[in-house]
Amino acid sequence: MTKEEIVTSTTTLLEKYGIDKPVVNVFQIAEDEGVKLNFVKMPEILKNVAGFFDFEDKEIYVNDDDPPNRQTFTVAHELGHFLLNHDKNEYGVLYRMQKINGENSPLEKEANLFAANLLVPSKMLKDTIKKYNLNDKDDEILASLFGVSKEMMGYRLKTCLK
């Protein structure tokens, strides 16, 4: 999928639910899209796994030990795998320490792009910056307003304001 197609899919989803300001409630969106959310304590062997999608049962499993903003990104990422119709035979898991723009498979990059654009859409970010008279140095404030990590907000500021 192209970047433009992924951005369009997130824009369409946000419009479908009438979301035009932060915080994007990705948990509600997932449930409204028929996906069940499970917050679980990962077994020791999977302790570094942030989450994964069970294609057969349409369920997202999220590491209960992760901080809320990481769980939010995990749900958005896994929802991306589902809504972008990724092939379940090529899918792996999203590891906790993975960077948003890290070296991943094409499917992981698409799911990361989907999550980033769903949680911090470009127009919404620009509108929020203008509304509160902020700038790209206010990444911590913006991260708080959007309910995402400072790292994720830094990534979105670089990609949206260039």
Image (tube, rainbow, N blue to C red):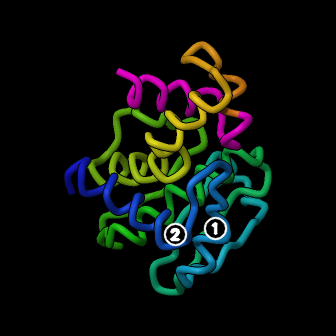
Magenta-colored span: 144-162
Q: Which residue is at the front of the view, 132 or 3?
A: 132
**Amino acid of disc 2:** Phe
Q: Is residue 111 highlighted in magenta?
A: no
Q: Which residue is at the front of the view, 126 or 109?
A: 126
User: Which quadrant of the view contains residue 149?
Assistant: top right
| Magenta span dominant secondary structure | helix
**Amino acid of disc 1:** Tyr
Position of residue 29 relative to residue 158, above or below, is below
Residue designated by label 2: 53
Q: Tell me which residue sits at (40%, 58%) in the image.
A: 11
Measure the C-alpha gap from mark 2 to mark 1.
6 Å
2 or 1: tag closer to the N-terminus: 2
Q: Which residue is at the front of the view, 107 or 43?
A: 107
Are there few (<14), some (14-19), or many (20+) residues within 10 Å of tag 1? many
Query: Tag on residue 61?
Result: 1
